[in-house]
Image (cartoon, rainbow, N blue to C red):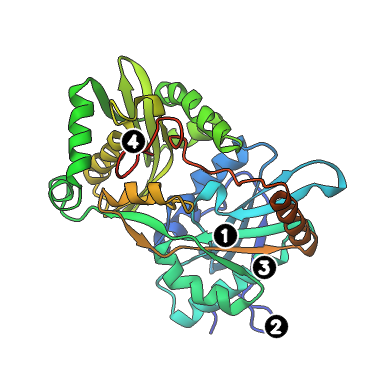
Amino acid sequence: MMTAPATADGEPTIRLDRAAIAPDGWDDLVAADGSTDYPHAAHWTESAARTLPGATALWLTARSEGRLVAGLAAVQQRAGRGPLARRRLDSSVEGTSAGPLVAADLSLSEQEALTRALLRTYRSLRPGPLGAVTMALGPDRERRFGPLVDGTGDWTRHASPTAVIDLDGGVEVVERDRLAMTKRNERNRGLRRGALVTATREAGDLAAYYPLYAAAAAHWGVSPTPLAFLEALLADPGERVFFTCVRLEGRVIGGHLNLHLGDRVFAWNGVSDPACARTHFPATLCFWGDIVEACRRGARWLDVGASGGQASLEGFKRFFGAELQERGYYVDEGAALRLARTIGGRAGAGRGERRSGARWHDGRTGTPLKGGDA
């Protein structure tokens, strides 16, 4: 018998709430699911809804005898104005992974029924022909839920593997067995030349980093994530977010904002100064600082994200022992949005346009070092 209340046709009852604050018991559900990523936490979605322009939070929930047993959180945003404005619901805001939550102590059949009901309800909320619903499933959740998503139909899956560093054994083992000699040497040279690496939760360090990040975003041709969102995350009362900061003579030359939940730390937002790439190796120092703090926190994995098809960035991560783990990005778009995207792609190709996304360092410091610098 279905644990959550069901409709006459046996479908679990899914409730929709549009609210800035998470439903009661949300973080208990995150803990009960057992394979979550930080963006499942209430603080992530609440911060996004509070600080991202025009954003609203959406919560899908299923309860049994008052207990929250399944849910899915998403953020709705609008791009453009007027009747042709596009709207999208994301359960994977800003390149992160999230998706459905289901209590792991339920039977497998109950978990699957609740997951299907969540996905069907979520897809039904697609905001019109110019709208889209999206979600990304991290490695653990791709194994657990990926086949169910495929089974519901009408989702387009894009492979988006993520690079992950195995932290088993702690800092000493990572340094000895996984860190390449070239990166060890770069770390040592950067530190000898005066660079300092700290793991901090000070908002001032993040604010000092932000102009560097904004300059990189301008180079990539994308809008930077608002500083207010980064600051709100860093203020997580559970201290699950930290900022790896690299300074040289008081100036920030690199940083990574890291999200920690359970056995996984995700190095989510980060850039380093290309002017210092060959002298102080701030990207290498950022990765090393991430590793040290993640190990101190007892994490099992450091997720350093997808490489967006950039071979030099993927190679750089391999020098830290990173291995690729499967991750799926799922999209359901309205017909008008698909057509607009197709026409836009053809027009861009006809004009000889290139997609942005070249690494900030490429072409700015000459030929990258072997392994590159992020």
Of mark 2 and mark 1, the one earlier in the sequence is 2
284 up-or-down from 301: above or below:
above
- At a point 39% along the width and 36% down the height, the residue shown is 256
**Of the residues shown, which amino acid type is indicated by label 1?**
Met
- Mark 2 = which residue? 8
| Distance from the alpha carbon under mark 4 to that under mark 1 | 29 Å
- Of badges 2 and 1, the one in the foreground is 1
- Mark 1 = which residue? 135
As rendered, which of 280 and 229 lies closer to the eye?
280
Q: Given the current orientation, which residue lies at the most extreme right position?
A: 83
| Distance from the alpha carbon under mark 2 to that under mark 1 | 29 Å
The disc placed on residue 283 is 4
**Of the residues shown, which amino acid type is indicated by label 3?**
Thr
As rendered, which of 16 and 331 lies closer to the eye?
331
- At a point 41% along the width and 57% down the height, the residue shown is 162
Query: How crowded is the residue under tag 3: few (<14 C-alpha within 10 Å), some, or many (20+)?
Result: some
- At a point 34% along the width and 50% down the height, the residue shown is 315
The disc placed on residue 121 is 3
Question: Which quadrant does the C terminus fall into?
Answer: top left
- Of badges 4 and 2, the one in the foreground is 4
